[in-house]
Image (cartoon, rainbow, N blue to C red):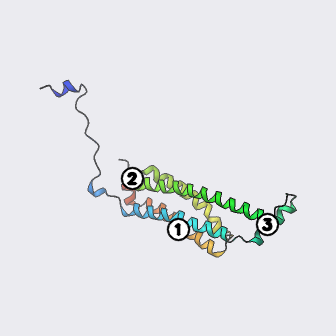
C-alpha cells in the first residue's frame, strides 16, 4: 500500500464546500420578493394595454393636424393608424424582452444569487423613476391608468423591500 503523499504530492485535498444546512432553506421573504417581482411586468402590461387602447381616431387626427402644421408630409388617418399599430407591436416585443430579463434575474435571486438582487434593485429603481411621471402627471389613459401605475410602483417597491429584509440578507450571503 502506498502512502497518501506518494499519490498526491500536495497533501490531502481540501474538504468540499459545505452544503446548505436544512435551516437555511429559502425564506418566505425571497418568495414574496419573487412573486411581487413577477406581478410587476404583469401590471406593466395592463398599463401598456390601457395606454394604447385609449388612443382614439380623434387623437390621431389631432397629431396629424399638428404634423401638417409643421410642414411635415401629411399622412392619411389609415396610414397613421397602421403606423401606430406597428409602433405598438414593436413596443410590445421590447417590453416582452425586458420582462423576460427581469424574470430571469428574479429566478437567479430566488436561487440565492446576491448579484441578481443588486441588478433587480438598480433596474427596479429605474423602473420606479420612469413610472412616477405616469402617476404625478396624469396619465394619458386617465385615472385608471394612473391607478394601475400606482399598483405597479407598489409591486416594484415590495420586490425590493422583501429582497432586503433580514431573512433575505442571510439567505443571499456569499457561500
| Distance in Å between CA atoms under marks 1 and 3 | 38 Å
Contact flag, marks 2 and 3 (Cβ < 8 Å)? no
The image quarter in which residue 152 lies = bottom right
Of the two numbered discs 1 and 3 on the same chain, state the one appearing first in sequence. 3
Along the line of sight, the residue nearer the viewer: 145 or 166: 145
| Distance in Å between CA atoms under marks 2 and 1 | 24 Å
Who's the residue at 69% across and 62% down the image?
85
| Residue 74 in picture, x, y percent from top left | 84, 61
| Residue 169 in picture, x, y percent from top left | 39, 56
Who's the residue at 76% across and 70% down the image?
59
| Mark toward the viewer: 2 or 3 | 3
Contact flag, marks 1 and 3 (Cβ < 8 Å)? no
Density class for disc 3 (Cα within 10 Å; few <14, some 14-19, many ≥20) is some
Left or right of 6: which side holds 175?
right
Pick the quarter of the image with the N terminus. Answer: top left
Q: Is residue 58 above or below residue 169?
A: below
Q: Dot 3 corresponds to which residue?
A: 77
Q: Dot 2 corresponds to which residue?
A: 112
Along the line of sight, the residue nearer the viewer: 123 or 78: 78
Q: Dot 1 corresponds to which residue?
A: 154
| Residue 43 in picture, x, y percent from top left | 55, 67
Q: Secondary structure at mark 3?
A: helix
Left or right of 37: which side holds 111?
left
| Mark toward the viewer: 1 or 3 | 3
Q: Secondary structure at mark 2?
A: loop
Density class for disc 1 (Cα within 10 Å; few <14, some 14-19, many ≥20) is some
Amino acid at each position: 500500500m502506498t502512502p497518501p503523499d506518494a499519490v498526491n504530492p500536495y497533501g490531502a485535498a481540501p474538504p468540499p464546500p459545505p452544503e446548505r444546512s436544512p435551516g437555511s432553506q429559502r425564506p418566505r421573504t425571497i418568495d414574496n420578493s419573487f412573486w411581487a417581482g413577477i406581478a410587476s411586468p404583469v401590471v406593466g402590461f395592463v398599463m401598456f394595454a390601457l395606454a394604447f387602447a385609449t388612443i382614439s381616431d380623434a387623437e390621431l387626427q389631432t397629431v396629424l393636424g399638428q404634423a401638417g402644421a409643421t410642414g411635415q408630409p401629411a399622412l392619411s388617418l389609415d396610414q397613421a393608424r397602421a403606423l401606430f399599430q406597428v409602433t405598438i407591436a414593436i413596443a410590445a416585443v421590447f417590453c416582452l424582452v425586458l420582462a423576460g430579463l427581469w424574470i430571469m434575474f428574479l429566478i437567479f435571486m430566488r436561487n440565492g444569487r446576491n448579484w441578481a438582487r443588486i441588478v433587480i434593485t438598480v433596474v427596479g429603481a429605474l423602473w420606479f423613476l420612469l413610472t412616477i411621471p405616469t402617476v404625478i402627471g396624469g396619465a394619458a389613459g386617465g385615472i385608471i391608468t394612473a391607478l394601475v401605475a400606482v399598483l405597479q410602483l407598489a409591486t416594484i417597491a415590495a420586490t425590493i423591500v422583501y429582497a432586503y429584509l433580514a431573512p433575505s440578507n442571510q439567505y443571499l450571503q456569499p457561500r
